[in-house]
Image: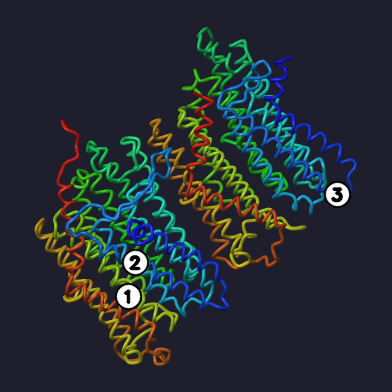
Amino acid sequence: MVEYFTQHILSFAIWMPILAGILVLFTANDNKPNVTRWLALAGSVASFLVTIPLYTHFNVADGGFQFQEGFQWILSFNINYHLGADGIAVPLILLTSFTTVIVVIAAWEVIEKRVAQYMASFLIMSGLMIGVFSALDAILYYVFWEAMLIPLFLVIGIWGGPNRVYATIKFFLYTLLGSLLMLVAFIYLYHQTGSFEIVDYYNYPMPLNVQVLIFLAFFAAFAVKIPMWPVHTWLPDAHVEAPTGGSVVLAAIALKLGGYSFLRFAMPIAPDAAHYLSGFMITLSLIAIVYIALVALAQKDMKKLIAYSSISHMGFVTLGFFLFNNLGLEGAIVQMVSHGFISAAMFLAVGVLYDRMHSRQIESYGGVANTMPVFAAFAVFFAMANSGLPGTSGFVGEFMVILGAIQVNFWYAFLASLTLIFGAAYTLWMVKRVFYGEIANPSVAALKDISKREFFILATLALLVLALGVYPQPLTDVTNATVTQLLSHLAQSKLPAGL
Amino acid sequence: MENIRYDLITALPEIVILSMAMIILLADLFLKQTNRIAIYALAQLALLVAAFITFSTHTPSIGYGFTAAFVDDALADVLKLMIYLGTSLIFIYTRQYIQLRNMFRGEFYALVLFSVVGMMIMVSGQSMLTLYIGLELLSLSLYALVALDRDNARATEAAMKYFVLGALASGMLLYGMSMIYGMTGSLNITEINNALMGGENIHSVLILGLVFVVAGLAFKLGAVPFQMWVPDVYEGSPTAMTMLISSVPKLAAFAFIIRLLVQGLPTLAVDWQQMLMIMAVLSIIIGNVTAIAQTNLKRMLAYSTISHVGFVLFGLMSASINGYASALFYIVSYVLMTLAGFGIILLLSRKGFEAEQLDDLKGLNQRSPWIAFLMLIVMFSMAGVPPTLGFYAKFAVLQAALQAGYLWLVVFAVLMAVIGAFYYLRVIKLMYFDEPIDQHPIQAPFDMRVTLSVNACALLVLGLMPQGLMSLCGYAIFKSLS
């Protein structure tokens, strides 16, 4: 039994939350929501516990895929159910299963209608996203990648705000368009190599023009998901309309699917194109970092502001990828994980306010620190982390990427570090307007401070942000070997000999 | 004597169904309305017996009967089994609907069985004459079925439209066939192929004949630019008939194309490939774009059918074993999806109320989460979103087209699939995000609920494990065509 488990950890990590989600659906009774809630919590905690061995049993010296398992799935097209995780995937898998627990707790009393469907959506989504991070077969990956759109589509559409229909359909169609082009690239590679194994694609040589087309097809899928400027416009809409849990998953994990996929597909499959287009990618990243930060400064809606801040921070991630050096790449991965915690916390904080006031507008608030001192302390801490204060995880990733950028080009680093100013500006200005000053109106005066449940979630996230900021080594240890191996792969040209 | 016995055995399933249709017509005269259910049972029994015969007499080899005008090969057997399955589902889904609308009579079951015989003859036709007879038997039964509800003006209008345009298409088909006959001197598919291989013919006349044949077939399939009748007939017909028209006959039309174009005219492949390509592209555009503007659910599904036909043509135009197998896989998946989709529409209809506007689906998740979930699967499957069967159908067709070198057409089809996704998503939006207008409890017989659940869930299960169906389709095409 134990042996069976250790050989199929990834399958357990994927299917346990999905089965738990299906089970939760059968308890659909809004009159007795507590049964559903406890079941969902048990399911998510169990799913999180299942993923922990991925970290404890991880061999840090091995940069390749570990925990591999698989069988032939669709013989007609040589598609395999092949799973495996390397140093980049493992932290993201843990992030996913952890975030799901947070989301379930955060929804505890907040979601009152169709509780079972809400909880089930998140549990199933969690399994599907872990599937994306651990699939080693292109079609298996694609199935997980697309399937996870369905629960998220429903979550935003059912429990979202007034303009939710527009936002969720826009989100779905944007992502679908990009991913279908990726599917065409997969089919092309299949006809060339006769396989859907991702590893087979790594070693398949291609001329530059083919590589560029393949890279662009992947770019269409991943740039939308990350999202990079200028295909980011779906994200602020989706975030504003999504319920808190939806925003948390979107920011903390869904965006990382795009980042992760660049490292898994676009770059190693088309390394020459990645080098060839690196100027383009870096330019887009820098525009995201600087321009979107300025856009964030102008926002009046708190969720929109954090959404733009997410795009700006994800700009750091893509910048780090295309520097092609160790610091940049590792910094980008740290940034992904750190952004997972910080953005989740920020959206939860907005959720806490929204649940009480039913407004996300900055102008509806003022002086909240007077009525909610404990909450204000957390909010200020996360705001500091978001603007990259040393000692928090936000600093580590950004600093590493900036250091990596200096090695390549001073101006890249200069522009990127502007975010330390802009980021502080928009975050702290929001904090100032919401939390400090006079108590703005009677409803703010009537606010009650956070409950034990809310305290627990925010405190857990705060500890993680601090831990990662002070001592990031447990994370970088895991990623190190994989990053080194990836960089050496990227340094080798895949152009066919004689071209 | 030996020959006749062999002939009869090859056509035994057809004979069984035909006899049962006759028996039903006769028995209907002597049955009271309260005992009519016996007719339903007889019709289902006929399908079951035919399925048993087809299954138990199946061999991977190709057998000819009736002086090689009739063929019994793997493709025919697989398609026939699908036709029995589809028709049986139609009987289950429509029973309550036609009972409530005074159409629960022997004619309905006899006509449907006649149309099934027509389809089976098309599937097994190895001569242009047999193919044509099968097609006419199918079409005439369908015209009559659409008009079965005598006092329904809309249905009568739809039947008229269907009949006039269908007759025109049959005429074109026959005209094209006569030219091919004139050039090759034979009606038999195999002999036509041999004659064309030999050379010695006037290419321009053949092409002219081919154009008429393809136009006639496109009419029956409902491919652009011969799609005009589809939305009107779908909308006007009683939903039970729409379900029939839109589902199983497509299998027979597919077989017709395989028999005539692929087996009979492979020497002209370059020419019909181009025609199919143009029709495929137009069907996908018109089908998907026009569907967005529809407010009537049945019309929307009509345009959705047109776009699905475009995807099937995509597989066929690849003109390879891989392409035909993927087209077969697509059309089988399409039939399963359509049956489930229309099944849900029938489920939501009740006495005096037709659930045919998109708005009738509003808030379905609150009225019945399970049925809404089934419809969700059907819609995502039609949109081609994994993990549903529809995804693998599109995947198979696209990879075949890409293998044949149509990279940019594949990119185009993919962009159109995104447009298509929009109107399927709108259905989900209505069911899940809106408040219900209609608060009537949903009533349906137990067998219908169970079958419908199995049907819709099969789209999901086959999406997780598509290998079986893929192998079956590959086997049918491979054994019959290579």
Mark whose residue sits in front, 2 or 3: 3
| Residue identifier under label 2 | A251
Mark 1: amino acid? Met
C-alpha span from label 1 to label 2: 10 Å
- Tag 3 subunit: B
User: What is the crowding at mark 1: few (fewer than 14 residues within 10 Å), some, or many (at least 20)?
Assistant: many
Q: Position of residue A216 (x, y in %)?
A: 29, 46
Mark 2: amino acid? Ala
| Residue identifier under label 1 | A346
Q: Nearer the viewer, residue A432 or A5?
A: A5
- Tag 2 subunit: A
The disc placed on residue B325 is: none
Q: Position of residue A231 (x, y in %)?
A: 33, 56
Q: Determine whether the residue tagged by mark 1 lies in a helix, strand or loop.
A: helix
| Residue identifier under label 3 | B35
Which of the image's four quarters has the C terminus of chain A? top left
Left or right: B326 with respect to A480? right
